[in-house]
Image (cartoon, rainbow, N blue to C red):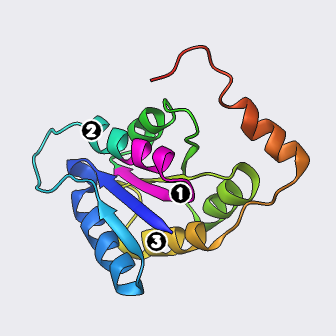
Amino acid sequence: MEIYVGADYHGFELKNQLVDFLRARGDDVTDEGAFEYREGDDFNDPAIKVAKNVRENRGSVGILICDSAHGVTIQANRFKMIRAAHCGSEEDAVLAREHDDANVLCLSARFTDFEKAKNIVTKFLGTDFTNLERRVRRINRLDEREDYD
């Protein structure tokens, strides 16, 4: 599974740690930036890159990090076929995958240290969608918006 990772300046350090962690595990990781710490940079750019890559590469997942995780979650969810979930715990990550087939994990740099992030990411990547009819129906309805990117 390909993993696309992106962050703004708030998430820059945590992103770099997670990229190293995932690569050490043998995962196929593409770093979508930020590539340098630039205070005040926008979360939008890496979130857009990650969302587009996940949408275009079925079976891939994304990981996005910003201060609260709210901005990257909102930005990623603007894209059809993206189901970004802000997860603050391992339990959140399991439910996001099992119930909603989330394909982008969003983390808060403010409230998630590296150890906690590793555990959340590991649960997210290791959990499969529970393919029940009602869940598939609900997920399909997520893309019933009138306007898209």
Q: Nearer the viewer, residue 29 or 65?
A: 29
Q: Is residue 61 magenta?
A: yes
- Percent x, y for residue 45? 27, 38
Residue linked to disc 1: 88
Whole-angstrom CA distance, mark 3 to mark 1, is 9 Å
Q: Residue at x 61, y 74 (%)?
A: 126
**Would residue 94 be found to the left or right of residue 37 on screen?**
right
Number of marks in the rendered image: 3
SS of the residue at dot 2?
Answer: helix
Q: Residue at x 58, y 43 (%)?
A: 83
Note whether 84 is above or below 24 in the view shown: above
Q: Are marks 1 and 2 in contact (CB under 8 Å)?
A: no
Q: Is residue 5 magenta?
A: no
Q: Amino acid at mark 2?
A: Asp
Q: Which residues are magenta?
A: 50-65
Q: Amino acid at mark 1?
A: Gly
Note whether 115 is above or below 129 in the view shown: below
Q: Residue at x 58, y 66 (%)?
A: 124
Q: Which quarter of the image is occupied by the C terminus?
A: top left
Note whether 123 is above or below 140 in the view shown: below
Q: Earlier in the sequence, mark 1 or mark 2?
A: 2
SS of the residue at dot 3?
Answer: helix
Q: Amino acid at mark 3?
A: Lys
Which of discs 2 and 3 lies nearer the camera? The answer is: 2
Residue linked to disc 3: 116
Note whether 17 is above or below 77 in the view shown: below
Q: Are marks 3 and 1 in contact (CB under 8 Å)?
A: no
Residue linked to disc 2: 45
- Percent x, y for residue 44? 30, 35
Q: Earlier in the sequence, mark 2 or mark 3?
A: 2
**Would residue 32 be found to the left or right of residue 95 on screen?**
left
Whole-angstrom CA distance, mark 1 to mark 2, is 22 Å
